[in-house]
Structures are given as structure tokens and as C-alpha cells.
Image (cartoon, rainbow, N blue to C red):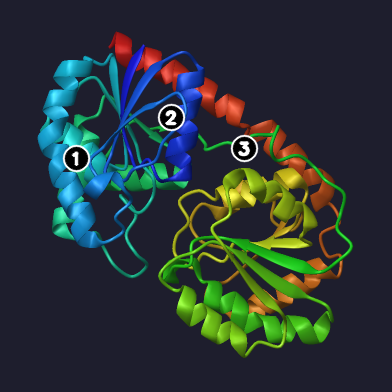
Amino acid sequence: MKVLMIANAAATHTMRWATAMANEGHDVRLLSVRHRDIEGVDVVSFSSHHATDPSRTGLTAGYARLRLGLPKELASFAPDIVHAHYASTNGYIAALAHARPTLLTVWGTDIIPKPGHSLSPSHRHRARKAVEHASIITSASPYMADHVRDLVPETPVEIVPFGVDLDLFSPSRPPTGFEILIAKSLEQRYGIDVVIDAMDEVARAVPGASLTIAGDGSQRASLEKKAADCVAPVEFMGVVPHEDLPALMSRSAVVVNPTVVDESFGVVILEAQAVGRPVVSPRVGAVPDVCIEGRTALLVPPHEPHAMATAIIDTLQGGLPQAHEDGPRFVRERFTWKASVDRMNALYSVVADA
């Protein structure tokens, strides 16, 4: 099957989906406003100078070029299916080009507003048009699917979780130290400052506790400044390749998912459980759906450093002994990457035959 995918090639989720579909035997061409080479996939970049341009101006220009170039790509590639990722940009552009048949995968911030806000009229218009145009819509979680139906009531949504590769993330022996891991982009919505604020309390209760942060982003300088005043050691590793995350998680005593806005799914939470590590996270969005509260994870209110510290201390002192066995079992039974790929592959056939 010829699959024309429209997505951000620089995103790990895109790379995994595109690679998986190519490995399933599909001829995948990926159109992206950011550039990244993906083995086995024909990546067509609409970014500035064929490089990642993180600026808003660069992205706007990239989407403009994508919108102009999509009709030509549709004509030359003649896909059996168009798979657009992210409703308010790529899905909207696919709708404007009347690309069919189209499968739309929503990601989260394309349809979920910030806490206390609503989607802007233009954002809502773009997302709604994408949803109305698509032949099939997929969501990683029921929580996110509800937001699709907020846009267009009674819209059918197929739940396709973003599963965990169990060949990569597998159970490991409990660590001997007290390392705490965060694997997130360094952006305000991910609440990393809350964890840093909690670390003095953690260090007083658990001598030897340290914090490792894997990721990069616009908040790095301010977070490093805050961490400089922290009693506990804080290491900023920068961007860590996805394939290196299992080793980081294996050496950690607890993985913290500090997101303070509504989480659309929670892949890191699942990956940590697959390795057998307890998780601490704010109770936001779909987080309760991807863990076993009280057995594999402790959930706390967002924006509360003391609550975060208390939960981290509890896990470091052995408060979730079941996590080592219950976490891998939970992921294996409900959230494997193979099951996700099989489900998406089946939906490709449904869309192509429609």
C-alpha cells in the first residue's frame, strides 16, 4: 500500500510510526515541515534549507510551502491512503487539499486547550475541519477522544494507544541508588521546575538522592539557574536518543512525569512501568488511564512541590514494591507496540477500501 504520511519528521512518535509502517511493507512517503532522515522512508522536507527550523516564522513558512506542495505530491505519488498527524496543522492542510481517503491521528495540543482556556476560534476551526474531513480518526486515549467529540459531537474515534516496544523496554533489576529521572522537553507545560523545587525536601529525607533530566528546550537556561541553588545534585543531559532511554530508566529508582497540563496519553509513564520502575506524576488528563495508581504510580496534584516531594520520598523509601512486577505486566497486557501497529495497519486497510 502507498501511504502518504503528513507529520513532523523530527518527532520521535512520527519516526516510530513511519518506520513501523515501512516495516509492514508499505511504501511510505513522509511530508514534513521539519527535516529528519528516516531509514526506509522517503522524507520530503518543506522546512527552511532542509533543516529543523524551530522558530514560529520558520514553521509558518514551512506549512505554507506544504500547503502549496501537497496537491503536487498527491498527483505524483498517487497514495492509497493519506495519514495526517496533528489535526490543526497537517490534518487541516490535508482537508484543504481534499486529500482522500484520509486517516487523521490527533496528538493532544491540536485539540486539547490549555487549562483554564479554550481553543482560539482559528485553532478550533482548523481542527474541526480536519476532523470533519477525515475518513477515520485515531486517538491514543479515550480522554483525547472526548476532546475530538467536543469539536464535532458524536464523531467515531478509534483508540490506538501509542504502545511500548517490549524488545527495547524490558524489566531490569531494581537499582541500588536514589536517582530520579525526568525524560521530557524543557518547556513550561512539563512542570520540571516543580520537581526541582521539591528536591531540597527530597534530599533532606533521602540523602544521596539526585535528579537527572533528559531533554532540551526553551526553559533550559532558567531551569539550570534554579537547579544551581538546589541542595541535591541535578544533571542536565540534553536530548537523549529514544533507544538510550531504557538504560537511563533502569539505573533510576523512580521516573517522574511532571506534566502540569492535561496529558493526552503518557508514553514515558508506560515505558517506565515496562522497565519495572515506579512513577510519580501529577493527576492530569489521561495519566490515570496509563498506570495503576497506588501500585505502579503515585499521582499528585499539579503545581505542588510538597506533594511531589512526598510522593518521590515514598517511592525512594520502597513505597511501591509491586511496581517491579505489576508495571511490566500492565504494559504487556494492554500497551504493546506490536498491538498498536497491528491495529493501525488494520485501519489502513479499512480506510483504503472505503
In the displayed structure, does residue 140 sit left or right of residue 97? right
> Circle 1 is placed at which residue position?
92
**Which residue is depicted at the point 48% across and 73% down?**
220
Q: From what the image shows, is residue 308 above or below residue 81?
A: below
Which element type, helix, strand or loop, lies under badge 3? Answer: loop
Density class for disc 2 (Cα within 10 Å; few <14, some 14-19, many ≥20) is many
Contact? badges 3 and 2 (CB < 8 Å): no
Mark on residue 18? 2
> Circle 3 is placed at which residue position?
164
- Residue type at mark 2? Ala
**Which residue is depicted at the point 31% across and 46% down?**
34
- Rounded to the nearest angstrom, the CA distance separating label 1 from label 3 is 29 Å
In the displayed structure, does residue 220 sit left or right of residue 248? left
Q: Which of marks 1 and 2 is in front?
A: 2
- Residue type at mark 3? Val
Residue 35 in the image: state x and y as whole percent: 34, 43
Density class for disc 3 (Cα within 10 Å; few <14, some 14-19, many ≥20) is many
- Rounded to the nearest angstrom, the CA distance separating label 1 from label 2 is 20 Å
Which element type, helix, strand or loop, lies under badge 2? Answer: helix
Query: Residue reaching furthest top?
Result: 353
